[in-house]
Image (spheres, grey):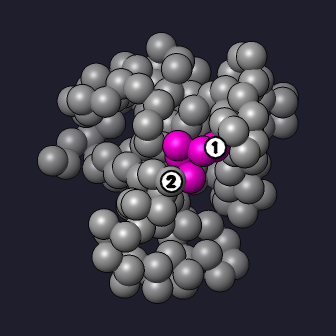
Amino acid sequence: MKRSLPPGHPDHILLFDGVCHLCHGAVQFILKRDPTGHIHFASLQSEKGQELLYYFDYPDRGLSSVVFLSDGQLYTKSDAVLRIGKKLSGAWPLLSTVAQLVPRFLRDALYDWVARNRYRWMGKAEQCMLPTPQIKSRFID
């Protein structure tokens, strides 16, 4: 279901697990490859993140998937990752388009395997990441 983001919100918002080191790395990766600043961020644990999930009637308020809100659509798991890739500079849009040829059930199975193991592989922070002053404007909460 397509719907507009609430007034005053950017068109592209990535909701990520704010205590996951892998997710922190992904945010840093995106920041470096999105020089125009199209993608904004909020942690899933934040009040703003939870408000947006509720606004889009997303039933899973937990941390089982990254969520990408783009142009009024909510994307999760591999669809979210590939949609983000299409917004980045370099070869990422092409790679994302090619990766979409892989059936979703296979992409999501790989996504779920990484998601289940992310804390064991990369660790977990005690609190959500705090953005530096240089990138603070890209975070909505």
Res 87 visible: yes
Q: Earlier in the sequence, mark 2 or mark 1?
A: 2
Residue 98 versus residue 47: which sits nearer the camera?
98
Numbered disc 2: secondary structure = helix
Disc 2/disc 1 C-alpha distance (Å): 9 Å
Q: Quick one: label 1, few (<14), some, or many (20+) residues within 10 Å?
A: some
Q: Is residue 19 left or right of residue 12?
A: right
Check if residue 46 falls in the magenta segment.
no
Magenta part, dominant SS: helix
Q: Residue at x 47, y 31 (%)?
A: 63
Q: Residue at x 46, y 79 (%)?
A: 99
Residue 109 is situated, as x and y percent measured from the top left of the image, at 40, 60
* Figure quadrant of the C terminus: top right
Residue numbers of the magenta segment: 114-118
Instruction: Say what amino acid the circle numbered 1 marks.
Output: Arg
Check if residue 116 falls in the magenta segment.
yes
Q: Is residue 111 left or right of residue 1?
A: right
Above or below, 129 against 118 in this view is above
Q: Is residue 73 left or right of residue 125?
A: left
Q: What's the mark number on residue 41?
A: none
Residue 35 versus residue 78: which sits nearer the camera?
78
Numbered disc 1: secondary structure = helix
Tell me the residue that label 1 is attached to: 118
Tell me the residue that label 2 is attached to: 113
Residue 44 is situated, as x and y percent measured from the top left of the image, at 50, 27
Instruction: Say what amino acid the circle numbered 2 marks.
Output: Trp
Dividing the picture into quadrants, the one containing residue 8 is top left
Residue 88 is situated, as x and y percent measured from the top left of the image, at 62, 67
Q: Residue at x 84, y 36 (%)?
A: 134
Dividing the picture into quadrants, the one containing residue 4 is top left
Dividing the picture into quadrants, the one containing residue 57 is top left
Q: Residue at x 31, y 46 (%)?
A: 74
